Every structure is written in C-alpha cells, then in structure tokens.
C-alpha cells in the first residue's frame, strides 16, 4: 500500500515535469508527434526503472559513509559521496547505450525517428534527477524501484499529452513570436494547473 | 603542461587577430539576445525553472553554471584533438561532472544554507543541455580562447533569462526582491500570487519572456 501510494505520488502529484521541471529539453523537442513521444517515453521508463535501483545499490554499498564495511571494517569512516555525480552519470550513460542498441536491433523505425534524442536521454535531467532525489529522500530498494518507474510513467503521460495538444495546435493561428517554444511553455503551464488537482490524493 | 597548452594558442593568435576582434565580440554578445541558449536554442530549460522561486538561489545557480560552462569549454577545447570521437560523450560528461562536483563541494563548505536550498539541482547542472550543447557544437572544433569567450556568452545568456524569470516570480510570488519586501517598503498592499511560487508561474513567465524577446528580435519558429 505504501509503495502504491509512492507510485501514485511519483506519477501524478510530484510529476517530474510539472513539479520539478526535469527532462524539459527532450520534453519540448520531441513532443511534436504522438508516436515519437510514446517511443521516447517508454525508453525513459525503461532507463529510469533500471538506473534508479542500480544507483541505489551503488549508493548503499559503495558511496555512503561507512558503506564499504562489507569489505573490511577499516573502511568504516570512509565517505565517497563526493563521487556520486560521476558514478551516477556513468551508470546512466552506459544504460542509455544499452537501450540504444536494443532499440536499434528490434525497432529500426523507432530508432530512426528518435534520432539524436536517444543519446540525449543520457543528459535527460529526469533520469539523473530521480537518482539524486532517491538519495536525498532515503528510499529503500523497493521504494527506489517504484519511484523510478513511477517517475518514468509520469514523464510519459506528460509528453504524450503535450504531443497530442501540439498536433492539434498546428492548425491554429498563433502570433509569430509566440510560435513554437512560447506557446508550448504556456500550454505546459496550463497542463501543470490540471495536474495540480491531484494534490492531496493518498490511498 | 596544461598551462602551456592553454597559453600557446592565445599568444599565437595575438599576432593574427586582435584579442577582442569583432568576431570574438560576437561570440559573447550573440548568445545574450539573438542566439540565446534558452529562448532561441531551447536548451537548459530543466534547471532554468526549478531554482527561480527566489533571486538569491538563482544568482548562485547562474554563477555556478557560468563557471562550469566556461571551464568545461576551455578544458574540452584544449583536449579536443586528443579525444576519440567515439567516446567523446563520456569524456565530456566526466569533465562536466568533475567541475560540478567541485562547485557542489565549495558550496557545501562555504554556504551550506544555499546548498540545502539548491539541493539536487546543483548536481543537475551536469545534465544541463547548454553545457553539453556548447561542448559538442563549439568547443570540439574551436581554439581554447574562442571557446572561453563562447562559454562566457552562453553562460551569461542563460543567466539573464533565469534572473529575469526569478525577478518576476519573487516579486509577485513573495512580494520581495533578494528578500527585500518591495511592496511593503513603498506602501502598496498587493496580495502575493501563489501561482508564481508554484512551478506553473515559471512556465507562464518564461513563455511570456520568450514571446516578448522573440517579437523584438523577429525570430519565428517554423
């Protein structure tokens, strides 16, 4: 029940995009077509679902203060936390490489349409952000996994919804300076208001 | 070894090109307005919005980003001929992550309050697309001194936009600027707007700033 609650919270209430602005770059750049948005969304769920638990294990057994005592008790006051940025980003970069190879093999069409944005998942703030939040909030392994997947689903929902709106937007008459990024930001704001209505939901 | 490699090209170029020639000035001034990383190139929006509730954390964040982008540009540019193309992303990320770790440790040591406020967002400078984008697009193919200038340009272009967003959000959301209660000081009784403190305010303000800025520069997206 606790876990379900955390999942709901990660998907709706603390949505990566609307509450923390994470992953905005690809959110804005790849949200022109629903099908591409779906593909990227699933890739993000997959990468998040893998990297957050791995980063948790890394944090718990290698980086944290005194985490290395399982090797030898003399490491009890060793604190490697300053290495966490580099370690996390290395894990993420290699996972993204893996996903890229899998997608290229099984769905060349999706691979073609995602193009440059696939490697850019590595620098998608939502991925690194989730890992950093996981450390900040002291989650357990199960919680970290649920949180990772939940954040991914929330991100997918947001990008697919925005892509659907932008597909319709092509037929409307937007003032010149507001075209593209400007109107997209305003729409995101309005969508954020809608997502705010989930505040306070708890199972 | 490193100082030698940094200085050499500068000395060489002095003879052929002025230290602040017209082309070089454009490297700094273009990203401020016409080629702004946030409002025109759509990069680095992630962290741009998260820290802009108040002016002070925003200022710290801007300084950190300028520092990281300038030095990352410089380092990558110095090493550009040594990096194999296949592993360049990892090398770039490693350089950025090292610089960001430096920033985060300095912040933790000298301004712990701000470190707690900014929290995970200092770490997220690593994934700030502006830094990556400039390394990929500029530092990999240009000389160190030019890259340095380009870093300053992009950094400041980013800084003024997020400072502008933070200005409006703090003014209308908390009624203050740098924690100085403006509205109270001049005797106006204006209700604080909760929407501005919320993430939604940031989206709206940035949307409007982009609108005004693009109308002025005449840039239209197709």
Image (cartoon, helix red, strand yellow):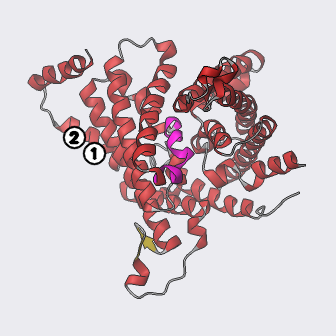
A111 over B41 or under it: above or below:
above
Q: Give the structural element (helix, strand or loop) at label 1.
A: helix
The residue drawn where x is 31% and y is 20% is: B78
Task: Tell me residue A30's x, y (percent).
Answer: 63, 39
A13 in relation to A120, above or below: below
Q: Residue at x 41, y 28 (%)?
A: B135
The residue beneath circle 2 is: B25
User: Is residue B218 in view?
Assistant: no
Counting from the top left corner in percent of width and height, residue A27 is at: 63, 43
Whether residue A7 is visible, yes or no, is yes
Q: Which residues are magenta?
A: B114-127
Q: Residue at x 34, y 50 (%)?
A: B33
- Residue contact between numbered discs 1 and 2, judged by CB atoms under 8 Å: yes
Q: Give me the residue at 51% from left, 61% from top.
A: B53
Question: Would residue A171 be counted in the magenta stretch?
Answer: no
From what the image shows, is residue B113 above or below residue A92? below
Q: Secondary structure at mark 2?
A: helix
Q: Is residue A97 left or right of residue B103?
A: right
Q: Which residue is identified by label 1?
A: B29
Q: Nearer the viewer, residue A10 or A120?
A: A10
Residue B7: % across, % down: 19, 22
């Amino acid at each position: 029940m606790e876990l379900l609650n955390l999942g709901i919270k990660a998907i709706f209430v603390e949505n990566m995009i609307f509450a923390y602005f994470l992953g905005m770059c690809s959110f804005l750049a790849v949200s022109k077509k629903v099908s591409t948005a779906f593909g990227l969304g699933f890739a993000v769920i997959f990468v998040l679902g893998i990297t957050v638990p791995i980063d948790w294990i890394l944090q718990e057994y290698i980086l944290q203060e005194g985490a290395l005592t399982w090797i030898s008790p003399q490491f009890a006051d060793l604190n490697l936390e300053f290495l966490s940025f580099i370690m996390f980003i290395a894990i993420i970069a290699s996972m993204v490489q893996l996903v890229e190879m899998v997608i290229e093999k099984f769905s060349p069409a999706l691979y073609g349409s995602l193009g440059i944005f696939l490697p850019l998942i590595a620098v998608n703030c939502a991925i690194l952000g989730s890992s950093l939040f996981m450390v900040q909030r002291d989650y357990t392994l199960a919680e970290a996994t649920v949180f990772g997947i939940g954040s991914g689903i929330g991100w997918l929902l947001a990008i697919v919804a925005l892509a659907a709106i932008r597909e319709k937007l092509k037929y409307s008459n937007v003032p010149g300076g507001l075209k593209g990024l400007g109107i997209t930001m305003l729409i995101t704001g309005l969508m954020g208001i809608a997502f705010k209505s989930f505040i306070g939901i708890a199972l | 070894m490193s100082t030698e490699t940094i200085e050499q090209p500068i000395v060489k170029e002095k003879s052929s090109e002025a230290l602040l020639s017209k082309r070089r000035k454009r490297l700094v001034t273009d990203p401020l307005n016409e080629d702004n990383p946030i409002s025109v190139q759509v990069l680095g929006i992630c962290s741009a919005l998260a820290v802009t509730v108040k002016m002070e954390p925003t200022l710290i964040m801007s300084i950190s980003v300028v520092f990281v982008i300038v030095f990352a540009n410089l380092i990558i540019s110095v090493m550009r001929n040594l990096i194999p193309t296949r592993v360049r992303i990892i090398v770039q990320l490693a350089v950025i992550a090292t610089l960001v770790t430096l920033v985060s440790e300095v912040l933790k040591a000298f301004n712990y309050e701000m470190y707690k406020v900014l929290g995970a967002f200092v770490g997220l400078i690593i994934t700030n697309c502006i830094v990556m984008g400039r390394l990929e697009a500029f530092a990999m193919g240009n000389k160190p001194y030019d890259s340095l200038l380009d870093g300053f340009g992009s950094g400041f272009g980013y800084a003024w936009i997020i400072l502008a967003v933070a200005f409006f959000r703090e003014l209308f959301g908390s009624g203050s600027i740098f924690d100085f209660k403006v509205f109270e000081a001049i005797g106006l009784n204006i209700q604080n707007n909760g929407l501005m403190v919320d993430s939604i305010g940031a989206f709206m303000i940035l949307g409007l700033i982009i609108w005004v800025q693009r109308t002025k520069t005449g840039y239209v997206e197709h």
